[in-house]
Amino acid sequence: MIKRYILVGFCVFITVLILSFPAKIAYRWFIPESVLLGHISGTIWKGNALQGMVGKAYIRDISWNFKPSDILRGRLTFNTASKPASGSIYSDVSLGYNGTLILSDLSGNVPLDVVHLIFKRNGIRADLSFNFDQIAIANEFPVTVAGTMQIGNLYIPDLSAGVLGNLSVNFVTERDAIKADFQDLSGVLQVIGTLSILKNGNYSLVGQVAARRGATPSIGQQLRLLGSPNENGLREFRFEGQL
């Protein structure tokens, strides 16, 4: 009888310990180095953090709730909500046994300069709204991206002193690259093209563009640098680099 009481007491102790496992300790053990959180409270199963960094993006007011059903799929999954400097982000965040970070049902809206410092350095601005089925990140780099994005109020200072317009982008993942097909929805530019990001971080941006009625003279001058237009009045462009 005494052994039974000891066993029951031990089981209760372990259950309480697991259910109340502090988020601060779990964070140090399980979260990838690319994710930094500050002012953590609550438990590993349900908690929040006042601020954090994911890659090079600052976020705040972070909350999470554990989804036990995904354990059978070999993942630790949390339903999360957070806010960047402006906007909001909602996603299921999973950590696979191989260390891959998976973002599922990712939706929200953020300014473009939150995505990567390259846009901020070049003064490029836009409002992003997105709905991704999945983004998988390994070694701090996306290896799978599937979903859609809307780019609103795009501003590129080297091209125009005013807003260029709005675009839609569709992301898919191929064997050796992430590709994003884009086209204009409205604005002073007619544009269509594809962005390809290779696994080594190299990218290429190719497409065709033309100025619409109402475009400033500076836009026409810049586009003439791309060469002669084709039979549809579109000029081809290509940019390459590394993220």
Image (spheres, rainbow, N blue to C red):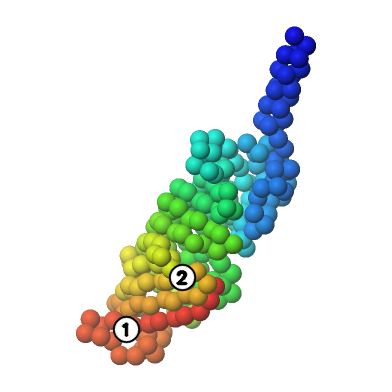
Viewer-closest of 173 and 57: 173
**Residue visible at 50% across and 69% down in the picture:** 199
Gap between marks 1 and 2 measured at Cα: 22 Å
Furthest-left residue in view?
231
Q: Nearer the viewer, residue 115 or 9?
A: 9
The answer to whether residue 97 is seen in the rendering is yes
Image side of residue 164 versus residue 6, left or right: left
- Image quarter where the C terminus lies is bottom right
Circles 1 and 2: CB atoms closer than 8 Å = no
Element type at mark 1: strand
How many marks can you see?
2
- Whole-percent x and y of residue 208? 33, 78
The amino acid marked with disc number 1 is Arg
User: For mark 2, what is the residue?
Assistant: 197
Residue under circle 1?
235
Task: Residue type at mark 2: give it.
Answer: Ile
